[in-house]
Image (cartoon, coloured by chain):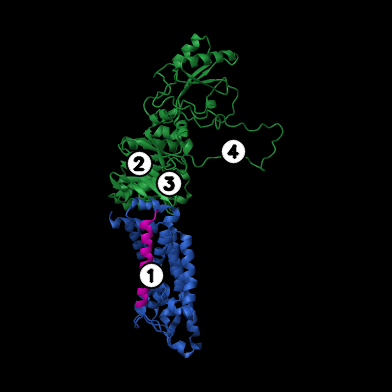
Chain colours: A blue, B green
Amino acid sequence: MATGQVIRSEWTKIRSVASTVWTLSLAVVVTIALGMLISLLSKNEFDNMDRADQLSFDPTFISFAGMSLGQLAMIVFGVLVVSNEYSTGMIRTSLAAVPQRGSFLFSKITVATGLALLVGLVTSFVTFFLGQAMLGEHGAYIGDEGVLRAVIGGGLYMTLIAMFSMGVAAMLRSPMLSLGILMPFFFLVSNILGNVPATKKIGRYLPDQAGSKIMQVVTPVDNDTPYGPWGGLGIMMLWVIAALAGGFVVLKRRDA
Amino acid sequence: MIEAVGLTKRYGDKTAVYNLSFQVRPGSVTGFLGPNGSGKSTTMRMILGLDNPSSGQVTIGGYPYRKLPNAPRQVGALLDAKAVHGGRTARNHLLSLAQLSGIPDRRVDEVLGVVGLQDVARKRSKGFSLGMGQRLGIAAALLGDPQVLLFDEPVNGLDPEGILWVRNLMKSLAAEGRTVFVSSHLMSEMALTADHLIVIGRGQLLADMSVQDFIAANSAGFARVRTPDTEPQLREKLSTALAEAGGHVLPEQDGALRVTGLPLPRISDIAHETDVRLWELSPHQASLEEAYMRMTQGAVDYRSTVDQKAGLQQPLPPGAQPQMPVPGQGQPGWYAPPPPQQGGQPFAMPQGQPGQPAQPSGPPQGPYGAPVAPAAAPNPYAQPAPAAPAVDTTKPKDAR
């Protein structure tokens, strides 16, 4: 069976359900709106900051502040794309039609990833430009060193978060279980681990913390992170590969 | 052709299917029967490669399903009518399946027309009734114009028009030389649709034979003889004479006699010789349902008990009669009598005998025209029986 056919079919599936539109537009709106809001607040607060904070002020990173919430919608998108098949029972129809399970999962993830990448990149650029407009005189320019990398990286980050969620959902199968683990993890656990000094060294190897380094242009003053922006994205990719491999093994082995 | 060899599936220490071997041949409708939880759906899923057998194997046209080249063009299946994403329209659901196997988009509109869903093609399937869901599932199975078709409970939830349509569809698919494998709980429907039966109970094969053989092997027809109610001595006289002639006579509750082992003309002759008038002499052919019930009696996992309604019983209003039990059901003799001997002709009845109700010739010889439960027979002489017949046997036989 030609992979092109499966991809075409997966595209029909993904465009024909409302959850795709809702989750992706929520990701776009939340990321942009929250980014603009925080950029505006930061601009007004800039003069009250102390010297160290002003030196490590990262206008690019500030404009991506909305991603901490926007990524949650991306997670929901990733989870639903995969686990919808299980919660509706559609998986049996799908796998009866595509007995080659690897090809089924690969096509599904390819289509969803392509869509997430497109939405992620657009969101990232729009967020950056609107955020810089809010920051005004403190803003950065796209031509500044490292800024373009950070903006493209923001799109990649959103894509990788969605892919990680797809892998987890393929392993766990249930949308409730997947969201129940992923949402608190990225919203709370990761932040707590990353900010408590005792666990900070472990926390920074978590997918979101490592991956978000790509959006940083100005290195903080007291930085002791042992990897750079691309290194961080690499760590996140390893997480994604692990999750997808796990999902593939589960799909291959278990009864549908 | 579907072929299972030693198919076994275990879930932990529970064995769902054990050592199942059978063949489903092209050109006929093969019914797949068994009580709830007997492993029918598990077997269907293993055929489609959704579940891995613990041991043994099942192949379609010689290939295990997962190795089958372009499977959706060769095999179509309806497993679960609700196995669709409710937020997707019927057309998009089918479109996504069609695109998988390179089926042109216009085929989607064709099958939507075939199953009668063209008017709701662009409606989300979550608003569909069970019957509409079944139609959508059948449309999906027909999409690739496959040679092998599997249907799990296809008539579930369908209206009478839909049931008739599915019946004709199955038969015409088989007549085109395709392999059609259908599971159902509706025995009356199976009797009309299937040519061949595979019966399982507790995951093991109970029978693999034609419908006629199955009925003959598991249940016998009988003759009902009624003598004048006013003269009980005639009944005794006839009983004795019939028994002497080699018949097996069972008294029925309403005073009739149930006779096996003697052809109808012989019973009539004996009655004439012994000078006994008859009020009724009627042939009763065992139905698939009776035969099925007899065979699977020992293999039923989920059996209902009498609802005692302890503590819930409302006092009957004055003058009200307690509900009579449905006649026949749960009483001795509810099942048709067993066949007299293995391989023996259960009820020797020369074909074309006058007095026998006209039966359409050729398979499948349905149970229609032959009532299932004794008291369900329209009997002008019997005392007024409670209205509800035990089983719905009143479907007109010309419904096909």
Nearer mark to the viewer, of 1 and 3? 3
Nearer mark to the viewer, of 1 and 4? 4
Q: Which residue is mark 1?
A: A239
Density class for disc 3 (Cα within 10 Å; few <14, some 14-19, many ≥20) is many
Q: Amino acid at mark 4?
A: Val
Which secondary structure, mark 3?
A: strand
Q: CA distance from mark 3 to mark 4?
A: 28 Å
Examine the rendering and report whether any part of residue A32 can be seen. no
Q: Amino acid at mark 3?
A: Ala
Nearer mark to the viewer, of 2 and 4? 2
Task: Look at the image and give the residue range highlighted in magenta.
Answer: A231-256
Q: Which residue is mark 4?
A: B306
Task: Specify whether residue B276 is painted magenta.
Answer: no
Residue B21 tag number: 2
Which secondary structure, mark 4?
A: loop
Q: Earlier in the sequence, mark 2 or mark 4?
A: 2
Provide the chain ID for the residue under circle 1. A
Which residue is rendered at x = 57% and y = 24% of the image? Answer: B253
Q: Do the residues indicated by labels 1 and 3 lie within the same chain of the protein?
A: no
